[in-house]
Image (spheres, rainbow, N blue to C red):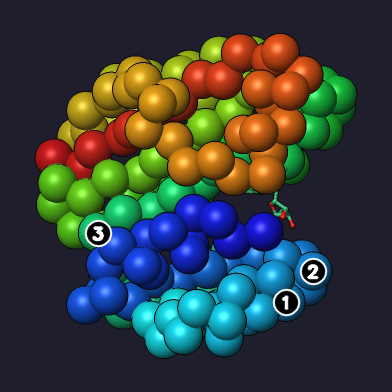
Amino acid sequence: MGQNLIELAQKNSDKYIVGVDPFMNGIASVINTSVEKNIKNILLFPHPVQTFFEKFEKIIFEKVFMLFPDPWPKKKHHKRRLFRTEFVKTILKKISKQGKLYFATDNQNYYDEALIALHKENFKEMPIEIKKTDTKELILTKYFLRAKKLGNKVNFLVIVKL
Ligand SMILES: C[S@@+](CC[C@H](N)C(=O)[O-])C[C@H]1O[C@@H](n2cnc3c(N)ncnc32)[C@H](O)[C@@H]1O
């Protein structure tokens, strides 16, 4: 619902914050809040993030946030997960050196698989540092609060491009 976007936009009024999600209710919510709070530095792309990166090849980001992507819990659906080696590489190509990719999930299997996807062998040509950061840094997004309410453990990673 854009909590992270709004907070980033308010704290960084000299920067553009880009929100990408095909879910129209979320897009509408961000527009409403932006109008209410007179926020003018948010850009929205209401389509899948894969399309965004194909379409806007030249934009380089400082930070990319993938917070609570759909966990696709059934094994036969794991290939639909967003956080996979190839897509992480696509994102890292679009961020600056020392730029960061943030990932959070309350699905333990997704987290375990994410760590496997980030194995050193897969990133020989693209060095990264992985930080298992404290969730206290996390913005209270809808799914973070949901995870807390359900008593689910939240795992939070920061991948730094070296
Ligand atoms: C579980 S929700 C998490 C929402 C939010 N990040 C949070 O923490 O509350 C997953 C979101 O990912 C969006 N999503 C799913 N596939 C996507 C894709 N390919 N590109 C961009 N967003 C996607 C869904 O529409 C949904 O809003």
Report the residue marked by disc 2: 25
User: Marks 1 and 2: CB-CB under 8 Å?
Assistant: yes
Placement of 15 over or under 8, stated as above or below? below
Placement of 64 over or under 22, stated as above or below? above
Q: Is mark 2 within 8 Å of ligand 1?
A: no
Query: In the drawing, does residue 93 fall left or right of residue 113?
Result: left
Instruction: Give the number of the disc on residue 28.
Output: 1
Quadrant where the image shows the N terminus:
bottom right
Query: Of the residues tagged 2 and 3, which is closer to the observer?
Result: 2
Query: Of the residues tagged 1 and 3, which is closer to the observer?
Result: 1
Residue 70 coordinates in the image, percent (x, y): 72, 40
| Mark 3, secondary structure of its residue | strand
Query: In the drawing, does residue 159 fall left or right of residue 40?
Result: left
The amino acid beneath tag 2 is Asn
Residue 117 coordinates in the image, percent (x, y): 48, 25
| Mark 1, secondary structure of its residue | helix
Q: Is mark 1 within 8 Å of ligand 1?
A: no
Q: Could you tell which of marks 2 and 3 lies nearer the N-terminus?
A: 2
